[in-house]
Image (cartoon, helix red, strand yellow):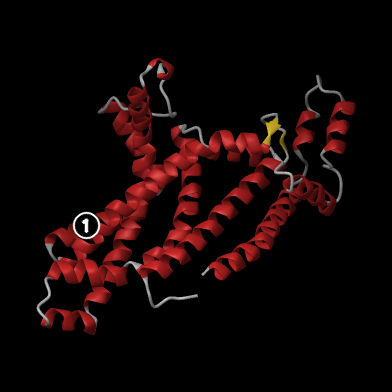
């Protein structure tokens, strides 16, 4: 297992470099650059713009640009954000916790809700409870996330006193420790519900399908003929076999939630990476876009390695 993990990490390094180079290549395909917009400002002289272009090698060949960026990466310097006027590493770090908090809470809540519901629905196949859950899951899978967010914000504005945007209230600094946690939790309700609905629906349907598949296998019938309790069969034998495909999905779940949170943060005003990255792409802030790409690629690779390790732990048949 240790050799497998080291091998996967070594393979992931050129993958990250390749993705970052492709990102730089695609950005350079767009006509112009960030400094072309500055030329429209009469208060900024041409000599200043040329000085910055030379400093960051904007007009150089794409290979030269990538070489100088890569040289800084080895020093943990991912470049400079022209839009926000600060280092990319510091900028992403300042917003990363907010996005991670939202995505991790959605990830944890989705699994805690979807897995038990999938198990119960499979055990109560074709009952009224199972049909209602399947119908609700189908509806939420069909609804676009941004539309659901707008509907929830409309309901909150007319029915409840929940905040409609942001992460903190204006009087946040005056609150106690528990008051601050409650305030952040209130602001998190709308984006968290939107992120969880699709994830719960997808995981629920997958878990239910896997449970039904395992329940019809021969070893389950043998366990029942031995007179073992149904709860022991379900939770010790069936669940352990049915959850394997979901463990495989674990590697893609967190990066997918990061991507889903990006659009949602723009709609709800959550101060994460979403709005910042949209602004970076629109303004052609090259190094900020590349820094975000490296971060998402790293999360995807780490998530897949974690899922492989957990799969080997949950399934003794798998050994590397």
Label 1: which secondary element: helix
Choose between 168 and 11: the one closer to the eye: 11
For the point 78% across and 51% down, the residue is: 66
- Left or right placement of residue 110 versus residue 78 in this view: left
- Left or right placement of residue 156 versus residue 7 in this view: left
Residue 294, image x and y in percent?
63, 50
- Left or right placement of residue 236 versus residue 54 in this view: left
Choose between 306 and 100: the one closer to the eye: 306
For the point 54% across and 53% down, the residue is: 299
Farthest right residue?
47
The answer to whether 48 is drawn above or below residue 102 in the figure is above
Can residue 46 be seen by looking at this rendering? yes
Choose between 157 and 286: the one closer to the eye: 286
The answer to whether 220 is drawn above or below residue 310 in the figure is below
For the point 81% across and 19% down, the residue is: 43
Farthest front residue?
2
Choose between 11 and 210: the one closer to the eye: 11
For the point 55% across and 35% down, the residue is: 95
The answer to whether 311 is drawn above or below residue 58 in the figure is below
Can residue 143 be seen by looking at this rendering? no
Residue 212, image x and y in percent?
24, 72
- Left or right placement of residue 320 versus residue 294 in this view: left
Residue 234, image x and y in percent?
20, 69
Q: Quadrant of residue 33?
A: top right
Which residue is denoted by mark 1 in the rendering? 133
């Amino acid at each position: 297992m240790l050799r497998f993990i080291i091998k996967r990490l070594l393979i992931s390094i050129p993958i990250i470099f390749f993705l970052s180079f492709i990102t730089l290549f695609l950005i350079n395909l767009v006509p112009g650059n960030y400094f072309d917009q500055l030329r429209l400002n009469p208060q900024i002289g041409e000599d200043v713009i040329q000085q910055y272009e030379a400093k960051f090698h904007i007009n150089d060949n794409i290979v030269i640009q990538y070489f100088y960026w890569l040289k800084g990466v080895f020093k943990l310097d991912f470049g400079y954000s022209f839009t926000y006027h600060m280092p990319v590493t510091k900028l992403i770090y300042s917003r990363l916790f907010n996005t991670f908090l939202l995505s991790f809470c959605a990830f944890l809540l989705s699994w805690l809700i979807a897995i038990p519901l999938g198990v119960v629905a499979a055990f109560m196949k074709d009952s009224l409870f199972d049909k209602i859950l399947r119908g609700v899951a189908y509806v939420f899978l069909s609804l676009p996330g941004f539309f659901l967010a707008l509907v929830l914000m409309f309901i909150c504005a007319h029915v409840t006193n929940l905040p409609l945007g942001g992460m903190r209230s204006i009087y946040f600094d005056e609150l106690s420790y528990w008051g601050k946690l409650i305030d952040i939790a209130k602001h998190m309700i709308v984006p968290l519900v939107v992120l969880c609905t699709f994830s719960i629906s997808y995981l629920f349907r997958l878990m239910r399908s896997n449970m039904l598949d395992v329940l019809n296998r021969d070893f389950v019938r043998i366990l029942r003929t031995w007179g073992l309790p149904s709860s022991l069969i379900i939770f010790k034998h069936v669940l352990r076999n049915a959850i394997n495909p979901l463990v495989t999905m674990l590697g893609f779940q967190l990066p997918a939630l990061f991507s889903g949170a990006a659009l949602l943060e723009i709609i709800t005003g959550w101060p994460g990476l979403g709005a910042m990255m949209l602004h970076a792409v629109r303004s052609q802030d090259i190094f900020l876009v590349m820094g975000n790409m490296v971060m998402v690629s790293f999360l995807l690779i780490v998530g897949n390695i974690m899922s492989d390790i957990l799969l080997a732990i949950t399934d003794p048949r798998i050994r590397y």
